[in-house]
Image: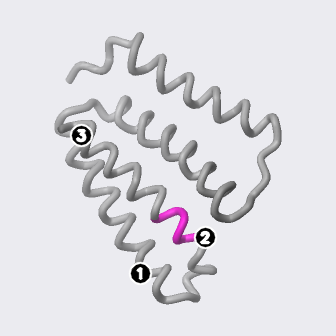
Amino acid sequence: MKYLYLALAIISEVTGSSFLNASNQFSKPLPSVITVISYLACFYFLSVTLKYIPLGVAYAIWGGLGIVLTAIVSVVVFKSKMDLPAIMGILLIVSGVLVLNFLSKTNAH
């Protein structure tokens, strides 16, 4: 269940970031409202996650996977371009999240 809350926090954050871009600096009402609601949901689910997963671990996963998914949405939806250094950086982030989850002993609460 703890990872469900974390997944909901990540999905909400990616949704909020995506609609933040679509809101055109909060000049479009519907994307702006979706942005605010998504970020509220994101921080709610992240706060619930912190009952079960230590802050550093939860934030690393939330931030790392949020970056990766937001980059994918940026490429697929907004037609942004990614160069090799950007891809390498994202792979390093994913590697860090994997190391933290599978090799670190800080995952226990």
Sequence-earlier tag: 3 or 2: 2
Quadrant of image for the N terminus:
top left
Residue at the image point whose x is 54% and y is 47% from the top:
69
Quadrant of image for the C terminus:
top left
How would you rate the neighbour count of disc 2 (Cα within 10 Å): few for under 14, some for 14-19, many for 20 or more? some
Number of numbered callouts drawn: 3
Range drawn in magenta: 16-21
Answer with left or right where residue 57 lies relative to residue 18: left
The residue at which mark 3 appears reads as 50
Q: Secondary structure at mark 3?
A: loop
- Please state which of residues 74 and 38 is positioned toward the viewer in this rendering: 74
Q: Do the CB atoms of the residues marked 1 and 3 lie less than 8 Å apart?
A: no
Color encoding of the figure: one colour
Q: Main secondary structure of the magenta part?
A: helix
Residue type marked 2: Asn
Label 1 – label 3 distance at C-alpha: 26 Å
Residue at the image point whose x is 32% and y is 12% from the top:
105
Q: Position of residue 19 (x, y in %)?
A: 52, 71
Residue 21 is marked as 2
How would you rate the neighbour count of disc 3 (Cα within 10 Å): few for under 14, some for 14-19, many for 20 or more? some
Residue 33 is marked as 1
| Viewer-nearest of discs 3 and 2 | 2
Label 2 – label 1 distance at C-alpha: 12 Å
**On screen, 84 above or below 28?**
above
**On screen, 5 above or below 108?**
below
Using the rendered view, name the quadrant where residue 61 is placed.
Answer: top left
